Image: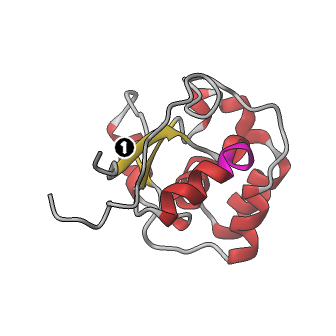
Amino acid sequence: RPTPTVNQIEMHPLIYSERRDLVDYCKEHGIIITAYGSLFSGYTERFQDPLLVSLSGKYKKTVPQILLRWALENGFAVIPKSSSSKARLGENLDVFDFEMEKEDVELLSQMKAEPLHEYWDPVNDAPIEIGDLSHENDEL
């Protein structure tokens, strides 16, 4: 069975620690993680977290931009949902003119709060056996 090339999962700082093993597995096997729900699935009250507010001030970026940059710094492809305005779309794209310090990325990765669990949990909801990957470098 061929190794998947992309794994699309809910990913943001509130869920990162419980999905760390899955993230590590994907990285070890060259599987790209595409993150959805990256802006806390629209639960904007979570944007008031003191760490997020502090980092927003430090980098002079909005909290959504901090969250998107965190995902990029972790090597995730990101698909933020924005249906409200062209300004929001532009804001979501304005995350490539800065980098976060490694310490700040790690602080976000360790955020402690009740995870949202808005979507399917690929680790616990439907465990599957992906088979023997020893052939993953074989030509098809």
User: Residue 88 versus residue 122: which sits nearer the camera?
Assistant: 122
Residue 97's place in the image compared with 129, above or below, is: below
Q: Position of residue 70 (x, y in %)?
A: 59, 59
Residue 74: in magenta span? no
Residue 15 position, x and y percent, is 69, 41
Residue density around tag 1, few if under 14, some if 14–19, many if 20 or more, within 10 Å: some
Residue 47 placement, left or right of 126:
right
Judged from the image, the secondary structure of the residue bearing numbered disc 1 is helix
Q: Amino acid at mark 1?
A: Leu
Which residue occupies the foreground of this view, 69 or 137? 137
Determine whether, in the image, residue 125 is placed left or right of residue 55: left
Q: Which residue is mark 1?
A: 89
Q: How many marks?
A: 1
On screen, residue 31 versus residue 70, left or right, reads: left
The residue positioned 56% from the left and 63% from the top of the image is 74
Give the residues drawn in magenta, as a range: 16-20
Residue found 57% across the figure and 28% down from its top: 42
Please determine whether, in this image, residue 20 is positioned above or below residue 9: below
In the image shown, does 136 or 80 lie closer to the viewer?
136
Instruction: Tell me, yes or no, whether the highlighted magenta stretch contains residue 17.
Output: yes
